[in-house]
Amino acid sequence: QAKPHHPNLPFVVVTAAYSSKVATQAVDAGAMECIGKPLNHKKVLHLIDKYTGGANQSLAQNPNAPIEGRGEVLLVAESEPLTRDLYHLIFDNAGYESSIVATYEECVQALEKE
């Protein structure tokens, strides 16, 4: 739903119900890619960096290097409260501003307000 109004908005689908069929559906719907849970924080930050201006060169050279945000605002839908809290900590520590909501519908509503 968001893609027609924000055609240049990159988004990645992260799901606990990952399968090749789900991944294909996500990409067909406009996602940059689809990945399954569980995730580690370095992979999440690498994906964010990848789609917000190019892969972090220090990460490519050293997978344990810290990743620093560049002021981008991240919009995330996550149904689990503890995972939402964890994402806030990860993104804040990496220098990203984030808005983390409970549902996909709330993401779409947030985009429509812009």
Image (cartoon, rainbow, N blue to C red):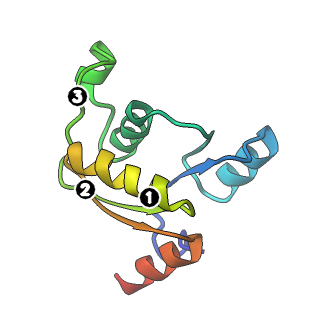
Image point (30%, 18%), residue name: 64
Q: Distance from label 1 to label 2 (Cα)? A: 18 Å
Image coords of residue 31 (percent x, y): 58, 53
Q: Where is mark 1, residue-wise?
A: 84
Please give left or right for residue 22 compared with residue 65 in the image.
Answer: right
Image coords of residue 51 (percent x, y): 39, 45
Q: Where is mark 2, residue-wise?
A: 72
> The disc labelled 2 sits on which kind of residue?
Glu
Q: Is residue 73 visible?
A: yes
SS at mark 1?
Answer: helix
> The disc labelled 3 sits on which kind of residue?
Pro
Of marks 1 and 2, the one in the foreground: 1
SS at mark 2?
Answer: loop
**Circle 1/circle 3 CB separation < 8 Å:** no
* Rendered-image quadrant of the N terminus: bottom right
103 lies above or below 81: below
Of marks 2 and 3, the one in the foreground: 3
Q: Where is mark 3, residue-wise?
A: 66
Image coords of residue 2 (percent x, y): 53, 73
State the image quarter where residue 111 is shown: bottom left
Image point (71%, 44%), residue name: 23
Q: Residues within 10 Å of mark 3 (few under 14, many from 20)?
A: some
